[in-house]
Image: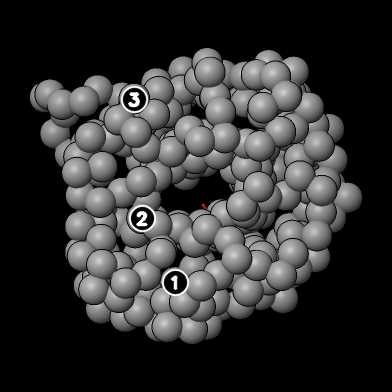
């Protein structure tokens, strides 16, 4: 399986931020893993044009999409629009959207279905809060989110699952390697149980305070097939080091 280093820029980046992509492409012209950047929607088209100019293999993704293909939904963006702008992937159900916009598993699943129907790969995010982990409910929570958010017929070409503990996002804190491995092994087992042996090829990303200093240790864990990186994806040097660590894993 080809691994995936995905950068989620969140609500960061004006046009000048694209210089970091040029630096990343120059430093890592032929990585041994897929490299994906999910800029804010305003930059998807410009990033797509830049990637062509750079003759780079970097992939482009959106950070959210509406479940409907078009209609009266002011401010929203459809999967078809992202595709039209040059995206091949889209993140759905990020914990910040689940929290800020009260997105439910059913809505996340509908978004993933819309993405896949438009030919995009949906990166479905799940993860427990700190209170849930402290209560010993981590596996219950992520199993429920996985069952509710991942659409029927999920396959390696259409779905990526990102495990992002909410309390590890942007905090500099991460679960222990054993804790990450426990969740990823459980997610893998659930996916194979539901979708069959082909689901062993569905990429499972870890996200939450991934940085150059911890990337190699995390990427060495079984069933960790890459990372979804926030803050460290904004700087070419940091994201490049993570790409290099994944390429070497
Ligand atoms: P950080 O890497 O900044 O912790 O963010 C992780 C994340 O939320 C990626 O989607």
Pointer 3: what residue?
117
The numbered disc on residue 60 is: 2
**Distance between mark 1 and mark 3 Cα atoms:** 30 Å
Q: Name the foreground residue: 9 vs 44.
A: 44
Q: Are discs 1 and 2 less than 8 Å apart at CB?
A: no
Q: Residue furthest left?
A: 72
Q: Judge the density around disc 2: few (<14), some (14-19), many (≥20) Cα neighbours within 10 Å.
A: many
Q: For the point 76% across and 40% down, which residue is it?
A: 184
Which tag, 3 or 2, sits closer to the chain's start? 2
N-terminal label among 1 and 2: 2
Residue carrying label 1 = 234
- Mark 3 beta carbon near ligand 1 (under 8 Å): no
From this view, report whether residue 82 is shown above or below residue 145. Answer: below
Residue 50's place in the image compared with 64, above or below, is: below
Q: CA distance from mark 1 to mark 2?
A: 14 Å
- Nearer-the-camera pick, 137 or 29: 29
The mark nearer the N terminus, 1 or 3, is 3
Residue occupying the point 21% across, 65% down = 49
Q: Identify the element where label 1 is drawn.
A: loop
Q: Position of residue 24 (x, y in %)?
A: 44, 78
Mark 3 nearby-residue class (10 Å; few <14, some 14–19, many ≥20): some
């Amino acid at each position: 399986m080809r691994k995936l280093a995905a950068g989620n820029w969140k609500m960061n980046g004006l046009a000048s931020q694209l210089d970091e992509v040029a630096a990343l492409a120059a430093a890592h012209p032929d990585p041994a893993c897929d490299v994906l950047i999910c800029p804010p929607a305003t930059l998807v088209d410009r990033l797509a044009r830049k990637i062509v100019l750079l003759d780079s293999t970097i992939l482009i993704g959106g950070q959210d999409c509406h479940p409907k293909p078009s209609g009266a939904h002011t401010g929203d963006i459809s999967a078809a629009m992202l595709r039209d702008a040059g995206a091949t992937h889209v993140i759905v159900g990020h914990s910040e959207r689940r929290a800020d916009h009260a997105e439910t598993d059913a809505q996340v699943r509908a978004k993933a279905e819309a993405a896949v129907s438009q030919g995009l790969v949906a990166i479905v995010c799940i993860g427990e809060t700190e209170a849930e982990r402290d209560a010993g409910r981590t596996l219950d929570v992520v199993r429920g989110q996985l069952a509710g958010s991942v659409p029927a017929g999920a396959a390696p070409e259409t779905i990526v699952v990102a495990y992002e503990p909410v309390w590890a996002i942007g905090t500099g804190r991460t679960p222990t390697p054993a804790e990450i491995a426990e969740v990823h092994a459980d997610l893998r087992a659930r996916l194979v149980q539901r979708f069959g042996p082909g689901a062993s090829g569905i990429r499972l990303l870890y996200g939450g305070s991934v940085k150059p200093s911890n990337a190699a240790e995390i990427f060495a864990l079984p069933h960790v097939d890459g990372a979804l990186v926030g803050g460290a994806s904004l700087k070419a040097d940091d994201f490049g080091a993570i790409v290099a660590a994944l390429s070497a894993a």
